Amino acid sequence: MTTTGGDLAARLMGDMDPELLDFLKTKVNTFIKWDLVRFFHENPHSADTAANVARYVGRDVAAIEAELGELVGTAVLSRQRIGDMAVYSLTTDAAMRSLIEQFVHACDDRQFRVKAIYHIIRGMR
Amino acid sequence: MSDRVQTGIAGLDEMLGGGFLSETANLVEGAPGTGKSTLGMQFIYNGIQRFNEPGIILTFEEFPQQYYRDAQAFGWPFHELERADKLRVVMTSPEVSQADLERVGGRIESLVREIGARRILVDSLSHFERLARDPIDLRRIVYAFINALKREGLTGLLTRESPALIGESSTSDEDIAFLMDAYLMLRYVEIESSIHKALLVLKLRGSDHAKDIRQFEITGSGFEVRSRFEGREGILSGSPRRMAESFVEAFVRR
C-alpha cells in the first residue's frame, strides 16, 4: 500500500493546533514571510521602508516587497504613508499579535518546525 | 522641579554641574568601543529606575535584541521595563524617524505619549550622514530632528562615532556640534603601553561645567567616572606626556 503526498500531509498536520495551521496556510506561507514575521515579532516597535527592512533581514528588497504587501493584506503587518515613504510595522491588533507570538514560540519546537517547513514547501509546488 | 536631568552617573553629573539641562540635545562622541551606547543606556535606565522618567531608545543600526543583551550584562532588565511600559526600544532609520516626527500624531510622538517618555537615546546620529552629502543640508536635517525631540519634551542623548581610534578626530560635520546643548567626548589614551579612556565635557550651553579631563571605565555596573589625569598633558592627542617632560622641552632645551 502506498502513501500519497496528501495522506502524509494530512497526518503531519493532523495534530497541529488548527489556529496555527490556518495561520501557516493563509498568512506565513513562504519562508520570506516567516523571516519577516519573526523580525517584526522580535522588534515590535520597528517601523521602516521595504528597502530598510530588506537590509535588516538580509534579503533583497525585490524579494520582500510583495511579501510585505501580502502580510499587510492578511493584517499581520500594517502599512502607513509617512511623507513619500511606505512604512511597515507590526499590527497593533492584540489578537493577531498573540497569534504571532504563539507561532514564534511553537517554532522553538523542532517537530513543529519540520511540519511547518514541509507545509510551506508543499504549498510552493 | 529641578531644571537638571541627572544621568545618575556619579562623577558625570558633577562634571555637568548637576546634570544635563532639561529638554536639550546632548552629543556624546567617541571612537568605537569607548562606551557611548553604554553611557546612553545607563542614562535611560537610571532615568527610569531612579528618577521615574520613562525613556525611548531610537536605534538606527543595532537590533533591539542587542540592547536587551548588553543591558542585561549590567543587570538592567530592559525587557521587563518594556513590559512595564517604562521603555521602548525602536529600530528604524533616520529618514523614517525624521519624516515621522515632522507629522502630527506620528509613531514616535504616540510612543512618547503612551509611556510618558522624558528621555531619549538616539544611537547614532552618524547615520544621518547618509541623508545629505552637503554639510548645510545635514545641519538643517539634524536641527529639525533635535527640535522635534525638544518639542516632545524629551531630553536627548545622541551618540556620534568618531573615526579616529586614538587622538583627535577630523570629522567633516563639526557643524553638528554647534547645534547641541552639550558636547561630551570619549577618547582612548595611551599611557605607558596601556589604553585608558578619557572623558571631557567640551560644551554645556547655559551652564558652567568641569574643564578637566577625567578617566573613566566600563565596569560590571556600567559607566564609572574616575579621577582626572594628573601630571600629564596632551591627553586629547591620545599620547599624553608627563608635565615635566613638556616643561623641559619648552624651557630647558631651548
Image (tube, coloured by chain):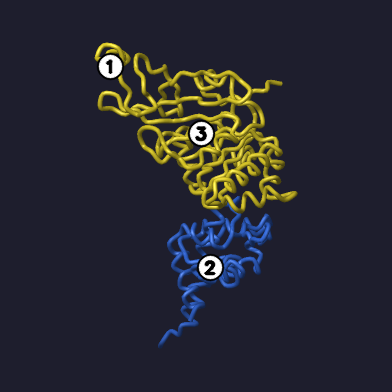
Chain colours: A blue, B yellow
Chain hosting mark 1: B
Which residue is found at the position 54% from the left and 66% from the top?
A33
Q: Residue furthest front?
A: B254
Q: Position of residue B53 (x, y in %)?
A: 64, 31
In terms of depth relative to the viewer, which is nearer, B6 or B178? B178
Q: Position of residue B243 (x, y in %)?
A: 32, 14
Which residue is found at the position 55% from the left and 19% from the top?
B209
Chain hosting mark 3: B
Residue type, numbered disc 2: Ile
Q: How many neighbours does mark 2 have within 10 angstroms: few (below 14), some (14-19), or many (20 or more)?
A: many
Q: Is residue A95 visible?
A: yes
Total number of numbered discs in the rendering: 3
Q: Which mark is residue A64?
A: 2
Q: Position of residue B16 (x, y in %)?
A: 55, 21
Residue type, numbered disc 1: Glu
Q: Which mark is residue B249?
A: 1
- In space, the residues marked 3 and 2 are separated at their CA atoms by 36 Å
Q: Nearer the viewer, mark 3 or mark 2?
A: 3
In terms of depth relative to the viewer, which is nearer, B193 or B171? B171
Instruction: Identify the element where label 1 is drawn.
Output: helix
Instruction: Identify the element where label 3 is drawn.
Output: strand
- In space, the residues marked 1 and 2 are separated at their CA atoms by 64 Å
Q: Which residue is mark 3?
A: B28
The quarter holding residue A20 reads bottom right
Chain hosting mark 2: A
Residue B141 horizontal side relative to residue B225, left or right: right
Which residue is found at the position 38% from the left and 18% from the top?
B229
